[in-house]
Image (tube, grey):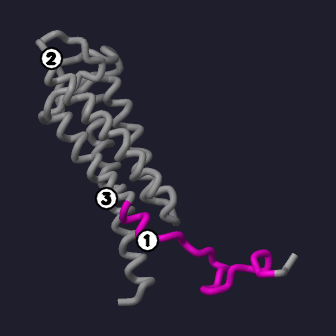
Amino acid sequence: MTQHTQVTRRRTAARLLAAVVGVVYLVLAVAGFALTGTGEFTQSTAHQVLIFDVSTLQNIVHAVVGVLGLLAAWQRTGNGTQFYGWAVLVVFFVLFCYGTVTLLASTGVTGDPLNLNWPDNWLHLVTAVAGLAIGVLALRSGPTRTANARPGFAGPQSAPGHR
């Protein structure tokens, strides 16, 4: 297997994983909006999609993450996909930490504006790991060359002694 084939496979895997994350979150958003509508912006414990508590705020966040995931999957270069992976890793790991602290400290008082439950929290951790995988796969695929670039040729502006 050539190096180009390996790079293409890693880039394709990163884009595919970004698309899967995007579709999952778009499905959660659409199903959530179907249940909650646009009212009850943050607090809504009466609505669940499968095992996940949903609210209008969560549905908006899920829709944004889903659309960005699909956009990252359609990127020709790995840069957008890589950025999406790192952003998903950071944001969802922070959400996982926030959810863990909030759920462990919970005494039954509804003060959590994100309306998280344990399944939501585990989904955030799985999503953070997926973000890590997307970022690493896109990073390992390396920078992409433009159509005019040739291997070993950096262009006249970078030649030593050339002005």
Q: Amino acid at mark 2?
A: Ser
Distance of label 2 from label 3 (alpha carbons) = 32 Å
Of residues 52 and 149, the one nearer the viewer is 149
| Crowding at mark 2 (Cα within 10 Å: few <14, some 14-19, many 20+) | few
Q: Which residue is found at the position 33% from the left and 42% from the top?
A: 26
In the rendered structure, which disc, 3 or 1, sits on the residue that comes first in sequence? Answer: 3
Residue 105 spot, x, y in % from top left: 16, 19
Q: Amino acid at mark 3?
A: Ala
| Crowding at mark 1 (Cα within 10 Å: few <14, some 14-19, many 20+) | many
Residue 153 in the magenta stretch? The answer is yes
Residue 17 in the magenta stretch? The answer is no
Q: Judge from the rendering whether residue 104 lies leftward or rightward of residue 128; answer left or right.
A: left
Say if 163 sits above or below 20 in the image: below
Distance of label 1 from label 2 (alpha carbons) = 43 Å
Q: Which residue is found at the position 87% from the left and 75% from the top?
A: 163
Name the mark on residue 106: 2
Residue 31 spot, x, y in % from top left: 25, 35
Where are the magenta residues, as a range?
A: 136-160
Of residues 91 and 18, the one nearer the viewer is 91
Say if 115 sits above or below 125 in the image: above
Identify residue for label 1. Answer: 141
Q: Which residue is found at the position 30% from the left and 33% from the top?
A: 95
Of residues 53 and 79, the one nearer the viewer is 79
Q: Amino acid at mark 1?
A: Ser
| Crowding at mark 3 (Cα within 10 Å: few <14, some 14-19, many 20+) | many
In the rendered structure, which disc, 1 or 2, sits on the residue that comes first in sequence? Answer: 2
Distance of label 3 from label 1 (alpha carbons) = 12 Å
